[in-house]
Amino acid sequence: MEKRVTFGRWTIGILFAVPQLLLIFTFFYWPAGQAVYWSLTLQQPWGGGNIWVGLDNFRSILSNADYWNSITASLVFAGISTGLAMVIALVLAVLTDRQLAGSWLYRVVLIWPYGIAAPALAMAFRFILAPEAGFMAVVNQVWPGFWDPGLDGADAMASIIVAFSWKYVGYNFIFFLAASRPFRAR
Protein backbone atom coordinates (compact mmCIF):
# COMPACT_ATOMS: atom_id res chain seq x y z
CA MET A 1 0.00 0.00 0.00
CA GLU A 2 1.36 3.39 -0.98
CA LYS A 3 1.40 6.12 1.65
CA ARG A 4 0.56 9.61 0.48
CA VAL A 5 0.40 12.89 2.31
CA THR A 6 -2.86 14.72 1.75
CA PHE A 7 -4.07 18.05 3.00
CA GLY A 8 -7.59 18.52 4.22
CA ARG A 9 -7.99 21.92 2.57
CA TRP A 10 -6.73 23.25 -0.74
CA THR A 11 -5.67 26.52 0.88
CA ILE A 12 -2.62 24.88 2.47
CA GLY A 13 -1.38 23.86 -0.99
CA ILE A 14 -1.83 27.43 -2.21
CA LEU A 15 0.09 28.76 0.80
CA PHE A 16 3.00 26.47 -0.05
CA ALA A 17 2.94 27.56 -3.71
CA VAL A 18 2.68 31.33 -3.13
CA PRO A 19 6.36 31.93 -2.16
CA GLN A 20 7.61 30.07 -5.23
CA LEU A 21 5.12 31.84 -7.49
CA LEU A 22 6.23 35.21 -6.08
CA LEU A 23 9.86 34.36 -6.79
CA ILE A 24 9.07 33.28 -10.34
CA PHE A 25 7.07 36.45 -10.99
CA THR A 26 9.65 38.74 -9.37
CA PHE A 27 12.77 37.30 -10.97
CA PHE A 28 11.44 35.99 -14.31
CA TYR A 29 8.13 37.40 -15.53
CA TRP A 30 8.58 40.99 -14.33
CA PRO A 31 12.09 41.42 -15.83
CA ALA A 32 11.03 39.67 -19.05
CA GLY A 33 8.03 41.98 -19.36
CA GLN A 34 10.19 45.04 -18.72
CA ALA A 35 12.67 43.90 -21.39
CA VAL A 36 9.87 43.53 -23.95
CA TYR A 37 8.47 46.96 -23.03
CA TRP A 38 11.89 48.63 -23.22
CA SER A 39 12.57 47.01 -26.60
CA LEU A 40 9.50 48.81 -27.96
CA THR A 41 10.45 52.26 -26.61
CA LEU A 42 13.19 54.80 -27.19
CA GLN A 43 14.79 55.80 -23.89
CA GLN A 44 15.63 59.47 -23.50
CA PRO A 45 19.07 60.35 -22.11
CA TRP A 46 19.43 61.50 -18.50
CA GLY A 47 16.04 60.22 -17.38
CA GLY A 48 13.89 62.25 -19.75
CA GLY A 49 11.29 59.51 -20.07
CA ASN A 50 10.75 57.30 -23.06
CA ILE A 51 8.96 57.42 -26.39
CA TRP A 52 6.88 54.56 -27.77
CA VAL A 53 8.38 53.49 -31.12
CA GLY A 54 6.86 50.03 -31.49
CA LEU A 55 8.77 47.77 -33.84
CA ASP A 56 11.00 50.55 -35.22
CA ASN A 57 13.86 49.44 -32.96
CA PHE A 58 13.72 45.98 -34.51
CA ARG A 59 13.46 47.34 -38.06
CA SER A 60 16.48 49.54 -37.38
CA ILE A 61 18.66 46.77 -35.99
CA LEU A 62 17.65 44.19 -38.60
CA SER A 63 18.53 46.58 -41.43
CA ASN A 64 21.95 47.43 -39.95
CA ALA A 65 24.90 45.77 -41.72
CA ASP A 66 27.06 45.95 -38.58
CA TYR A 67 24.47 43.88 -36.71
CA TRP A 68 24.56 41.14 -39.35
CA ASN A 69 28.38 41.22 -39.40
CA SER A 70 28.42 40.66 -35.63
CA ILE A 71 25.89 37.81 -35.94
CA THR A 72 28.02 36.21 -38.65
CA ALA A 73 31.20 36.60 -36.57
CA SER A 74 29.46 35.08 -33.54
CA LEU A 75 28.21 32.10 -35.54
CA VAL A 76 31.63 31.54 -37.13
CA PHE A 77 33.31 31.70 -33.73
CA ALA A 78 30.79 29.39 -32.06
CA GLY A 79 30.79 26.85 -34.87
CA ILE A 80 34.51 26.61 -35.52
CA SER A 81 35.75 26.87 -31.93
CA THR A 82 33.21 24.40 -30.55
CA GLY A 83 33.71 21.96 -33.41
CA LEU A 84 37.49 22.18 -33.15
CA ALA A 85 37.49 21.69 -29.37
CA MET A 86 35.10 18.73 -29.61
CA VAL A 87 36.92 16.93 -32.43
CA ILE A 88 40.35 17.35 -30.85
CA ALA A 89 39.04 16.25 -27.44
CA LEU A 90 37.34 13.18 -28.94
CA VAL A 91 40.46 12.10 -30.82
CA LEU A 92 42.66 12.61 -27.75
CA ALA A 93 40.19 10.75 -25.49
CA VAL A 94 40.10 7.78 -27.85
CA LEU A 95 43.90 7.70 -28.10
CA THR A 96 44.38 8.14 -24.35
CA ASP A 97 41.87 5.44 -23.43
CA ARG A 98 43.90 2.71 -25.13
CA GLN A 99 45.77 1.88 -21.89
CA LEU A 100 49.23 2.51 -23.30
CA ALA A 101 52.24 3.04 -21.07
CA GLY A 102 52.17 6.55 -19.65
CA SER A 103 48.57 7.24 -20.66
CA TRP A 104 47.84 8.44 -17.10
CA LEU A 105 50.32 11.26 -17.70
CA TYR A 106 48.60 12.21 -20.94
CA ARG A 107 45.25 12.35 -19.12
CA VAL A 108 46.62 14.76 -16.54
CA VAL A 109 48.36 16.95 -19.11
CA LEU A 110 45.27 17.11 -21.33
CA ILE A 111 43.05 18.21 -18.43
CA TRP A 112 45.42 21.02 -17.31
CA PRO A 113 44.32 23.64 -19.86
CA TYR A 114 40.82 23.68 -18.38
CA GLY A 115 42.26 24.46 -14.94
CA ILE A 116 44.10 27.57 -16.14
CA ALA A 117 42.35 30.86 -15.41
CA ALA A 118 41.11 32.80 -18.43
CA PRO A 119 43.31 35.88 -17.79
CA ALA A 120 46.41 33.68 -17.60
CA LEU A 121 45.35 31.98 -20.81
CA ALA A 122 44.87 35.34 -22.50
CA MET A 123 48.33 36.52 -21.45
CA ALA A 124 49.96 33.28 -22.61
CA PHE A 125 48.29 33.38 -26.02
CA ARG A 126 48.97 37.11 -26.31
CA PHE A 127 52.65 36.32 -25.97
CA ILE A 128 52.57 33.25 -28.23
CA LEU A 129 50.57 34.93 -31.00
CA ALA A 130 52.06 38.44 -30.75
CA PRO A 131 53.29 39.50 -34.18
CA GLU A 132 56.20 41.45 -32.71
CA ALA A 133 57.60 39.13 -30.01
CA GLY A 134 56.00 35.68 -29.94
CA PHE A 135 56.13 32.60 -32.12
CA MET A 136 54.30 34.46 -34.85
CA ALA A 137 57.12 37.04 -34.94
CA VAL A 138 59.30 34.30 -36.43
CA VAL A 139 56.62 33.63 -39.05
CA ASN A 140 56.41 37.37 -39.77
CA GLN A 141 60.17 37.49 -40.33
CA VAL A 142 59.85 34.82 -43.02
CA TRP A 143 56.62 36.27 -44.48
CA PRO A 144 56.39 39.96 -43.50
CA GLY A 145 52.87 41.07 -42.61
CA PHE A 146 51.52 37.51 -42.60
CA TRP A 147 50.12 37.72 -39.06
CA ASP A 148 48.76 40.85 -37.39
CA PRO A 149 45.62 40.36 -35.29
CA GLY A 150 45.65 44.05 -34.35
CA LEU A 151 44.97 45.06 -37.96
CA ASP A 152 43.39 42.01 -39.57
CA GLY A 153 40.01 40.82 -38.28
CA ALA A 154 40.53 37.30 -39.65
CA ASP A 155 43.80 36.98 -37.69
CA ALA A 156 42.08 38.25 -34.55
CA MET A 157 39.24 35.74 -35.00
CA ALA A 158 41.73 32.92 -35.58
CA SER A 159 43.66 33.78 -32.42
CA ILE A 160 40.47 33.84 -30.32
CA ILE A 161 39.30 30.54 -31.82
CA VAL A 162 42.66 28.89 -31.09
CA ALA A 163 42.74 30.15 -27.49
CA PHE A 164 39.12 29.17 -26.80
CA SER A 165 39.53 25.74 -28.37
CA TRP A 166 42.73 25.06 -26.44
CA LYS A 167 41.02 26.02 -23.18
CA TYR A 168 37.99 23.78 -23.69
CA VAL A 169 39.70 20.73 -25.17
CA GLY A 170 40.44 19.64 -21.58
CA TYR A 171 36.83 20.12 -20.50
CA ASN A 172 35.46 18.12 -23.43
CA PHE A 173 38.23 15.55 -23.00
CA ILE A 174 36.99 14.77 -19.47
CA PHE A 175 33.49 13.99 -20.72
CA PHE A 176 34.62 11.99 -23.74
CA LEU A 177 37.02 9.96 -21.60
CA ALA A 178 34.30 9.28 -19.02
CA ALA A 179 31.85 8.32 -21.77
CA SER A 180 34.30 5.85 -23.31
CA ARG A 181 34.73 3.86 -20.07
CA PRO A 182 31.65 1.63 -20.47
CA PHE A 183 32.75 0.62 -23.97
CA ARG A 184 36.18 -0.45 -22.76
CA ALA A 185 34.61 -2.84 -20.24
CA ARG A 186 33.04 -4.89 -23.05
Image (tube, rainbow, N blue to C red):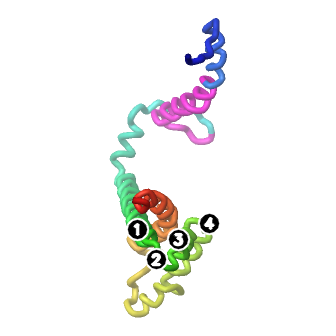
| Circle 3 SS class | helix
Dot 2 or dot 1: first in sequence order is: 1
Residue beneath disc 3: 107
Q: Quadrant of the N terminus?
A: top right
Q: Amino acid at mark 3?
A: Arg
State whether residue 13 is above or below residue 146: above
Can you tell which mark lies on residue 173? Answer: none
Residue beneath disc 1: 94
Q: Position of residue 170 (x, y in %)?
A: 51, 66
Q: Residue at x 63, y 10 (%)?
A: 7
| Circle 1 SS class | helix
Dot 3 or dot 4: first in sequence order is: 3
Q: Which residues are magenta?
A: 21-46
Dot 3 or dot 2: first in sequence order is: 2
Q: Position of residue 4 (x, y in %)?
A: 59, 17
Q: Amino acid at mark 1?
A: Val
Q: Position of residue 63 (x, y in %)?
A: 33, 47
Asked whether disc 3 touches disc 2, contact meaning CB atoms under 8 Å apart, the reply is no
Residue 98 in sight in this render: yes
Q: Amino acid at mark 4?
A: Ala
Residue beneath disc 2: 100
Query: For the residues carrying marks 3 and 4, which lies nearer the camera in this image?
Result: 3
Asked whether disc 3 touches disc 4, contact meaning CB atoms under 8 Å apart, the reply is no
